[in-house]
Structure formats: C-alpha cells, structure tokens
Amino acid sequence: MISRMCFKRRMTRTAACLLRVTAAGLIVLSLTGVLHAARIKDIAVFRGVRPNQLVGYGLVVGLAGSGDSNSTIFTLQSMSSMLEKMGVTVNADDIKVKNVAAVMVTAELPPFARSGSRLDALVNSIGDAKALQGGTLLMTPLKGADGQVYAVAQGPVATGGFLVGASGGDKVSKNFPTVGRVVQGASVEREIPFDLNQKESLTLALNKPDFTTATRVAQSINTGFMDQVARTQDSGTIHVAVPPSYYGNIAQLIAAIEGLSVTPDSVSRVIINERTGTVIMGENVRIATVAIAHGNLSVEIKQNYNVSQPMPFSERGRTVVTPDTQTMVQEGRAPLQIMPSGVSIGEVVRALNALGVTPRDLISILQALKAAGALQAELEII
C-alpha cells in the first residue's frame, strides 16, 4: 500500500514536471514566432503620412575670427543686404570682417506639425569658415519644395566639436566644427493641410515591395478586423477600406493596423564585399548538389647572406658577401566535400568551415557556385 502511494506521488510529480517542461517549450516556441514577426509599423507607411524636407539660407554671426574670409563674395553680399534691410547702407566691397559665416539650414517637418511646434535645425557652412562654434544663427526662413515658408530658425549653434590653432600654423580639431545644430531652434509657421477623418480608405506602402509580404499584410489586417477590409494592389501597395465603426476616428484605425504583426518575406541573397572580405548570407539561401574542393598554393622564398673571408695572410683575398636563396612550394590539402541539394545556410557554413576556408576563399567559392548554377540565391557584390 505504501509503495503504491509513493508510486502515485512520483507519477504526479513527473506529470507536473512534464507539464512545466511542455509549458516552457510552448513559451519558447511562441517567443520564437514573435521574434521572427515584425510590426506593420516597421515595414510599411501610410501614404500621405510622411515628413517633409525644409531648407533655407542664413548667416551665423558672433564667430571669433573663424568665419568666412573676404574672398567669399556671397557672404559679403548677404551682410550688405541684411544691413540695408535694417536701415544701414554699406557697400559690400567695404566690409572686412571674419566673424560671419554663410550657412545652409535644413530641417524636417514631421506630419501633422502644428503652428508653434519646435524643430531642430541643422546648420552647414557653405563658405570657407573654419568653425561655427560660439556663433548664433540669425532668423532664417525655411522653405519646402513648393517654395512656401513653413518654419523660421534662429538661435545659438551647438557644434559638438572645436578648432584650436596657434600663430605658428598648428591646428587641433575635434569632430566637424563647420557643422552644427540649433536645438529646438526652428518654429513651425505654416501647417500642411491633411484631414484624415475625411478619408474612406487608406493606402499602405511597403518599405521593400514583395508580393508575399504584401499578401501577408492584407491577411493580417483582415484577420485582425474580422472583415475583408484590405486587399493587395501590387507588391508594394495595400488598400484598406475604413470600417464603419472607425468613421471620424481614423487615427485609432491607423494605430490598430500598425500594431499588427507580420512575418516579412525576402529574396534569398548573398552579399559580398571584396574590399573588406565580408560575406553575408540570408536565411533562405540554398544550394544544389555539388562537390567542392578548394586548395591553396603557397610559395615561400627565403634568402640568407653569408660572408666569405679569405685565408689568413692571403695577398689577393678579400671578403665577399654571398647570397643563399631557398625556394619552397607547398600546396594545401583540399579534400573533396559533397553538399547535398537543399541544405540550409547552417549546413553550408559548417561544410565550408570543414574545408578550412577563409573569407577570401569563401568569396571565390560562392562566385564559382553561382557560375555553376548551384547557388539558389542572388549574388550581389558591393
């Protein structure tokens, strides 16, 4: 009786352990599936919801002699025009200063930016200024591609570097002192009109067009909303009809779609960089049945110099240096390695490692496999 009870307890403990192991295995499998999936937000964008580029021309003042030289004509003309607008008439030929630098100012206007929003502005010298550190950007209008002013930038320039020079000509610099940033220095003055709530359909554009990925995105959206609201137009475009429950609340619909998970697909590709010896293979790379043998031929030449001295008390003898050259040729052992058809990338790597190949040898082998038609992937050399 006691043995039966002990046996039952052991069986109960064993079953509990198996349940724990099985649960742990299910967790690992689910996590593995999640790791391979990506959010729609990371692989696609909604058409019309994108940032816009802004650019402007301005002046940075307050530089300690590190601005543009007097040979930079457009800087002198800009200073003369600026002073004239302020009621000071100065001829451009009479300006002799080195505390001003002409710069191009760029910024990125995010979607749905409102008037009064603050943006970072990037400042780049276009003259022969040595450094922009310690300078201040004067009011600069930033225009879009349509020529309209959407923001105005002004403020102190932070370069994140420095330039120190001595009178003897020695200079020490860190980073790039001719490029700086005006943090939160651009103010949005014009909004881009775009009303989401008036739309009856949305268009998703994949970052990397692929028919399989586009189909999976449409299926994920239809499964998530329990309705056939998404359809694939081509390899990079998915149309989504706005469900009646989301009329007037398109932002919530976009947030729900962006949070869905999709496993993106990609073409099997092998990337080779011969300059650095880098080889990157995709997960789906396969090869046909093939036999590979790769050997090395090394030639080593050693040369020693011996000194030949004459016999003692020799009248015509003299010391002579005689070279001793030895040449050795060694061919590396290259066993024939057979790789069956359809092997995975891990098996390919293990087989090539068994051959003892280097990255340079691997590049030659992959090129030969592609020429033989055995490499079932795109071979791209960068």
Image (cartoon, grey):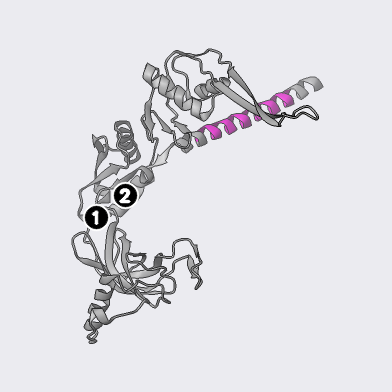
Q: Is residue 113 above or below residue 214?
A: below
- Choose between 186 and 110: the one closer to the eye: 186
> Looking at the picture, how far across and down is residue 281, in whole percent?
45, 30
Question: Can see residue 92?
Answer: yes
Q: What segment is highlighted magenta in the picture? A: 8-30
Name the image quarter holding the C terminus: top left
What's under tag 1, amino acid-wise?
A: Leu
Please report the residue visible at 25 percent of the width from the left and 79 percent of the height from the top: 93
Number of other residues with Cα within 10 Å of mark 2, as a class: few under 14, some 14 to 19, many 20 or more? some
State the residue in front, 289 or 119.
289
Q: Quadrant of the N terminus?
A: top right
Dominant secondary structure, magenta: helix
Q: Secondary structure at mark 2?
A: helix
Direction from residue 294 to residue 157 in the image, left or right:
left
Q: Quadrant of residue 327?
A: top right
Secondary structure at numbered mark 1: helix
Residue that label 1 marks = 196
Identity, as a three-letter code, of the amino acid under mark 2? Ile
Residue that appears at 42% across and 26% down: 284
Residue at 36%, 30% (x, y): give it: 267
Residue 90, compared with residue 136, is above or below; it is below
Q: Position of residue 350 (x, y in %)?
A: 55, 23
On screen, residue 207 versus residue 5, left or right, reads: left
- Labels 2 and 1: the sequence-earlier one: 1
Tags 2 and 1 touching, CB below 8 Å: yes
Q: Which mark is residue 254?
A: 2
Within the image, what quadrant is residue 42 found in?
A: top left
